[in-house]
C-alpha cells in the first residue's frame, strides 16, 4: 500500500494514463471482478439517469407545493422517491439526502473538502470546479470571495452557511424562487434551476 | 467521490444511544491519527454547535482498516463560526462528524 | 485541504462541460463504482488509498488519476488483480 513510483513493475506508473487504465481494466476483467459489458452498462445507465434535472424537479415542486417542501426539508430521500428520482431508503439510494433552504437571511453553499462528495444522482456528473483544489480549500474560508468568482456578489447582510459534506449524507440547496415566476408551471420552473443553484454557487 | 452504494450502512445498523442532541455545544477532539479519519484538520480542537443529526453510520476509521464489525455511531452536523476557525469571516461552516470525534464542553 | 490558501481562483466552467474530459476518465469512474459494488473494497478504503498518495503527487495529479492510483493500490494490496 505504498503508491510507489518506479520499482513496482505491476503499477505501470510510467505508462501514459490511458494505457494504464486499459491495463487495469484488463486485469480486473481477467480476475473475474467485472466484465467489459458491466462497465459499459454502468456508464450508460449513469449518463442517462444522473442529471441536474432531477434536483431541479425537486426544487420546482417545493416552490409550488408547500407541504412537499416541508417533507423534503425533513426527509430528502422520501421526497425524491415521491417524484421518482431516488429511493426513500438511504441505503438503497447510496446516500442520505439533506436539503438546505436559502432564505431572505441565509444563503447556503455545499463543498466536500476531504474528497469531492456530491449527490451525483440528483445533480448529474460533478463539474470540474467542484473537484478543484481551489474550491475545496477556499470556500470554507472565504466563501464571499469564491462566490464572487462565479459572478455571485451577495449583500453583506446575507449570512453564508457552508456545508462540508464529508459523511455519507449528501447536501442539496433549495434556492429561493425568483420574483416574477408566479405564473410558471412546474415544468417551466424546473428549467430555471441550474446545477450551480443546487450547489449554492448561483442564486437559482 | 464514487457512489458508495455497495458499502453503505445497512438499515439494521443501530448506534449506541447518541450522547449529544440538537443545540449541544461540543468540541472536536484534537486528534491526528496515523490511520484514515473523516475529521477535517481545520475543525480539530474547535468548538461548535450541533444543528442536525443524520442518524447512524459505520465509523470510517474502522472500515478503512478492515475492523469487523466497525463501530456504528450517530453522525452529527456541527456548525462552527468562521471567526473561530480562521480568525476572520462572518459565515458559518457545518461539518458532519461521527460521535466519537466529539467531546462535550 | 480545507482552509488552505494559495490555490488561486476557482476554475469556473458553468455549462457545456462534458461529464468526462477523456474516455479513460469515464472508464476509471465506472471501474471504481463497479468494484465498490462488487465488494472489492469499501468506500472508506478507497478514500484512504487516495489520501495516502504523497502530497506532492496528490497535488500534481488530476482527480481521476488519483482514483486510478487508488484502485491499482487497493487491488494489489488485496491481491485481487
Image (cartoon, rainbow, N blue to C red):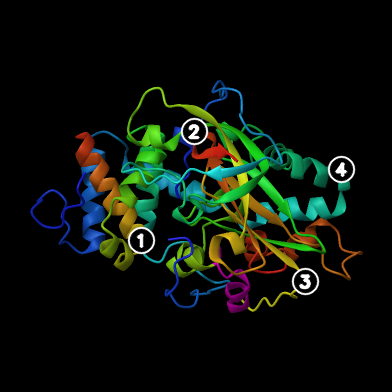
Disc 1 with disc 3 on a shared chain: no
For disc 3, the marked residue is: A157
Q: Which residues are magenta?
A: A139-149
Local SS, label 1: helix
For disc 4, the marked residue is: A67
- The nearer-to-camera label among 3 and 4 is 3
Query: To which chain does the residue with label 4 belong?
Result: A
Query: To which chain does the residue with label 1 belong?
Result: C
Q: Disc 3, disc 4: CB below 8 Å?
A: no
- Residue B66's place in the image compared with B45, above or below, is above
Disc 1 to disc 2, C-alpha distance: 28 Å
Local SS, label 2: loop
Disc 3 to disc 4, C-alpha distance: 29 Å
Disc 1 to disc 4, C-alpha distance: 43 Å
Dominant SS in magenta: helix
For disc 1, the marked residue is: C23
Amino acid at each position: 500500500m505504498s503508491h510507489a513510483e518506479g520499482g513496482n513493475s505491476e503499477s505501470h506508473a510510467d505508462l501514459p494514463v490511458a494505457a494504464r487504465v486499459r491495463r487495469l481494466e484488463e486485469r480486473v476483467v481477467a480476475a473475474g471482478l467485472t466484465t467489459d459489458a458491466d462497465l459499459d452498462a454502468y456508464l450508460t445507465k449513469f449518463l442517462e439517469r444522473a442529471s441536474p434535472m432531477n434536483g431541479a424537479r425537486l426544487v420546482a415542486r417545493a416552490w409550488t407545493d408547500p407541504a412537499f417542501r416541508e417533507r423534503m426539508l425533513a426527509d430528502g430521500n422520501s421526497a425524491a422517491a415521491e417524484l421518482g428520482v431516488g429511493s426513500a431508503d438511504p441505503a438503497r439510494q447510496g446516500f442520505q439526502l439533506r436539503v438546505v433552504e436559502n432564505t431572505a437571511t441565509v444563503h447556503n453553499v455545499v463543498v466536500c473538502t476531504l474528497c469531492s462528495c456530491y449527490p451525483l444522482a440528483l445533480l448529474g456528473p460533478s463539474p470540474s470546479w467542484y473537484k478543484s483544489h481551489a474550491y475545496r480549500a477556499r470556500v470554507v474560508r472565504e466563501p464571499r470571495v469564491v462566490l464572487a468568482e462565479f459572478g455571485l456578489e451577495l449583500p453583506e447582510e446575507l449570512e453564508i452557511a457552508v456545508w462540508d459534506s464529508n459523511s455519507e449524507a449528501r447536501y442539496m440547496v433549495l434556492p429561493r424562487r425568483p420574483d416574477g415566476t408566479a405564473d410558471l408551471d412546474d415544468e417551466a420552473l424546473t428549467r430555471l434551476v441550474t446545477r450551480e443553484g443546487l450547489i449554492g454557487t448561483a442564486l437559482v | 467521490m464514487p457512489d458508495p452504494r455497495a458499502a453503505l450502512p445497512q438499515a439494521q445498523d443501530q448506534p449506541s444511544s447518541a450522547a449529544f442532541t440538537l443545540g449541544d455545544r461540543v468540541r472536536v477532539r484534537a486528534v491526528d491519527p496515523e490511520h484514515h479519519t473523516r475529521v477535517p484538520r481545520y475543525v480539530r480542537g474547535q468548538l461548535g454547535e450541533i444543528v442536525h443529526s443524520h442518524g447512524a453510520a459505520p465509523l470510517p476509521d474502522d472500515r478503512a482498516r478492515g475492523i469487523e464489525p466497525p463501530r456504528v455511531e450517530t453522525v452529527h452536523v456541527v456548525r462552527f463560526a468562521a471567526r473561530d476557525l480562521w480568525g476572520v469571516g462572518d459565515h458559518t461552516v457545518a461539518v458532519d462528524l461521527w460521535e466519537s470525534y466529539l467531546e462535550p464542553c | 485541504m480545507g482552509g488552505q490558501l494559495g490555490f488561486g481562483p476557482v476554475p469556473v466552467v458553468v455549462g457545456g462541460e462534458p461529464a468526462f474530459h477523456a474516455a479513460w476518465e469515464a472508464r476509471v469512474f465506472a471501474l471504481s463504482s463497479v468494484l465498490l459494488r462488487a465488494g472489492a473494497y469499501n468506500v472508506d478504503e478507497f478514500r484512504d488509498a487516495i489520501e495516502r498518495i504523497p502530497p506532492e503527487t496528490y497535488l500534481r495529479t488530476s482527480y481521476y488519476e488519483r482514483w486510478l492510483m487508488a484502485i491499482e493500490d487497493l487491488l494489489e494490496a488485496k491481491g485481487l488483480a
